[in-house]
Structure formats: C-alpha cells, structure tokens
Image: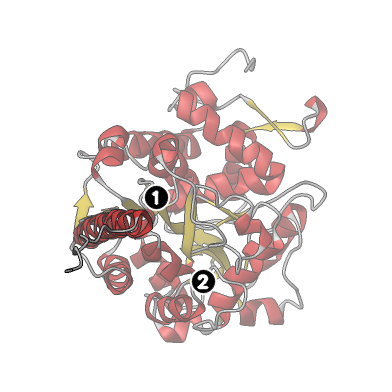
Amino acid sequence: MSKETKKSTPKKGNKTKKKINKAALIIILSIMIIGIGAGIAAGLYIQKEKSKNLDVAFYKLSDLVKKELENYVSQSYDGKITFTDISEEQFDARKIAKKYDLFFSWNGSAVSKLEKYSEPLPEGITSQMPTSLRRKAEKALPIIIDHYEFDYYRKAKTDAGLDFPQNIVELESYLKKMRSYTFTPFFCAGGNDDTLLALIGGFVEAFGGTASYNELISNFTKRPSLAQTLDFELSKSGKKQDSFTLRAILDMLRNWQEEGLVHPNWYRGTQVDVEAFMDVKQIAILFTPLSIHRTMPYKNVTEMDVDRMPVFSVDISHGVIAPTVVAVKLTNQKLFDNALYIFAEDTTQEALCQKIKLGPVNRSSKVYDRQSSDVRFLVAACRDGALPPFGDAVFQTNETAKHKVAEEIRNYLKNGPTGVYRVTSTTK
C-alpha cells in the first residue's frame, strides 16, 4: 500500500521572520535614501555657503590701509569677495547695513551711525587687547591706532633743563621758557581742519577728561555751530564749580598768540610751514598725528621726543586722542567671522604695524619702533583708551559742516568774540 504524500506547510515563525526581514530592509533602504538626501542637501548647503559673496565696504581710508586690509580679508575667505570704496555722498547707514557684510573705517560718526545695525563681534576676538580697548569694543573691532602727539624739540628741552610738562599749568610755563630758544614755542598745521579740531578737542579732554570730551561731541552733533556751543558748560567732575566752556579754551589760545607762545597765524599753518620751521629748529612743541610724523624728513623727527598732550588733572578719567581703524560686522553670518579674527592675530598685527607704521592693538605684538610702542602704551594706560578726534567724532560724514566749524574757530582765534553770536543760556 503506497503512502500518501503530505504537503508541507511553513511554520508560522518562519513566515513572521520573513515579514520582519522585509520590513527591516525597507527601513534600512529608507534610512539610506534619507541619509543620501541629507548628505546631498548638506553638500549643497556647504557649497552655497562657500560660494556666498562677502561684501566689504571701505570708508575714507588711505590706499595703503585699504591694500593691507584687502590682503588679509582675502586670506581669510575662499569664496568671492567684493571690495567697495564708499564716498561721503554715498554714505547711508541703513543702505550700507543692508548691502555689506563688513565695514572698515576710522572710528567716528560713520561708525556710530552704523551701530544700531551692527552685530556683536565674534566671541573672544579682543582677548589679546588691553582692557581700555576691550571695554569699548563691542560693535567695532580696533585694528590699528594713530595718535595726535606732542613732539618736543629735544635740544631746546635739554638746554633749558626742562622735563616733559605733566599738566596744563606746567605746559604754559614750559612754552614761556621756550620763547628764549625758539621762534614759535608751539605750532601745528592749523590750516588743516582735522588737525585744528583735534587740537581743540584735545584741550577739552585735557581739561575735563573723557566726560567733557563726550559732552563736546554731543553738543556739536546736535548743534554744529560754534555760536551755539561756545558757552555750554563742560564739566570735569559733574560738579558745577568744576565746569568750563569751549570759549575758555579758545581764549587761552588767543592769549598764547598775544604772548608769543604760538605763531600769530598758526591756525592757518600748513605742513609746508611745519617742515620749514623744523628745518631751522624753531618749534619747541609740535602737535601732529603720528601718520604725518611718518612722512616728515628723518633728520627732523629724530630730534623730537614724543608724548601725549598733558592733562589738567589725573584724578578724572581720561582717554587719548587716537584715530583708530575699526571693523564693523553688519551680518549675523558666522561664515565671515574669520575675516575679523585674522586681524586679532599677533602675526597680522605685527605685519600691519611694520607696513602702516602705526600702533598695534594687541598688548604683546611686536612694534615698528618706539613711537608705535608709545601709542599702544598710552592707550593702554588711559582708562578710556583711544578716543576718535573731534572732527571724525562729529563730522566724519559731512566735510562741509566740518570745514564750516573749523572756519568759525579760526575766525574766533583771529577776531575774538566779534561777530560771534553769544549764547545767553547754558542750559543743556
């Protein structure tokens, strides 16, 4: 009898296992597809980021400074970079903020107008700077520093047996003694608007410290006229009895003219006049920016000792009138942060110092010479660090208004109160 052949039936467990294997395969394939898609998307994103154009704006910088800044920005970013030089007529803070990623300029009113559109600086970027610079570098990165200096003719100082004057009272006494040694004890290229305004602002700061200097800037920003600001009180300590006015500063300079402490027409002086007097050793103290000092004949500048403007009192907070090239970040795009970090590196600071011959912002960077070192020391030694000169602080985006005020000051220095509207109230 033949045996009946039985049809085999798969076990339930095997069937379930096959279903699980199939589901797992689908999941794995799905994950792979998602992963590949994500990888492609990430690659496209990275490619897009790398190809993003870096738009850089320069404002009122010399060709030398622009060339060096362009060099380091280009080293820091592999993508396309567009560099644009903005004129005063083109300056519009809102439009600049929308169009550009980075903005480079001397610190002044242009930077102040961009502040509300700017982004915080990258973390830790100012760690190598002295405290006086770090404290104010939230929205503008200091890169290199100029300085309005007092240059003392060394031989006259030595022959008279004098040391550097330590305050304004000693300065006037020093100049009186220098009448016996030089034709013009004090001089500067006062015909240059920036130099004239830097000197006037410097004396305000010397008498009343940073607080008074900021009041001066605020007053002229609101009322860009000598007549409307001449008699506003500038306080040294916040106390009324310590106050003084811009008129007092200008009258002091008029007295210097009458007493022969300064050339009677110094406020029209040019750089040609400066160098002519220096050639014959007839200036005891010269007021000039370090950047101009660098252009003068070697035989003249080697005979001068450099210091900052003396102050009235060290018991109040001071800064130094030191024009500073700064960078402002106008985008939240971190991809461009390296274009800022590179300027905080010691190697960059040292190279910039060697080529531009101004002061570095890092506390330990190597310097070009003693004058570059002095700039950094003076900025670090003053609590309020580098202050923009009066002209840049108020009129950086309006040369016409700057020249108008400079001419009003020259007219006062020549004629006194005649023709100047006298403010009857000093209420702020």
Give me the residue at 52% from left, 84% from top: 302
Q: Name the residue nearer the viewer: 236 or 347.
A: 347
Residue 125 image position (x, y, % from top left): 53, 62
Check disc 2 and report the residue beneath it: 359
Helix, strand or loop under label 2: strand
Residue 352 image position (x, y, % from top left): 41, 76
User: Alpha carbon of mark 1 to alpha carbon of mark 2: how far?
Assistant: 22 Å
Check disc 1 and report the residue beneath it: 329
Amino acid type, mark 2: Gly
Return the disc, 1 or 2, that comes first in the chain's sequence.
Answer: 1
Helix, strand or loop under label 1: strand
Mark 2 neighbour density, 10 Å: few (under 14) some (14–19) many (20 or more): many
Residue 380 image position (x, y, % from top left): 66, 64
Residue 339 image position (x, y, % from top left): 36, 64
Q: Is residue 110 left or right of residue 122?
A: left
User: In this rendering, does residue 108 appear at all?
Assistant: yes
Q: Is residue 62 left or right of residue 169?
A: left
Quarter of the rendering containing residue 39: bottom left
User: In this rendering, does residue 268 appear at all?
Assistant: no
Amino acid type, mark 1: Lys
Quarter of the rendering containing residue 82: bottom left
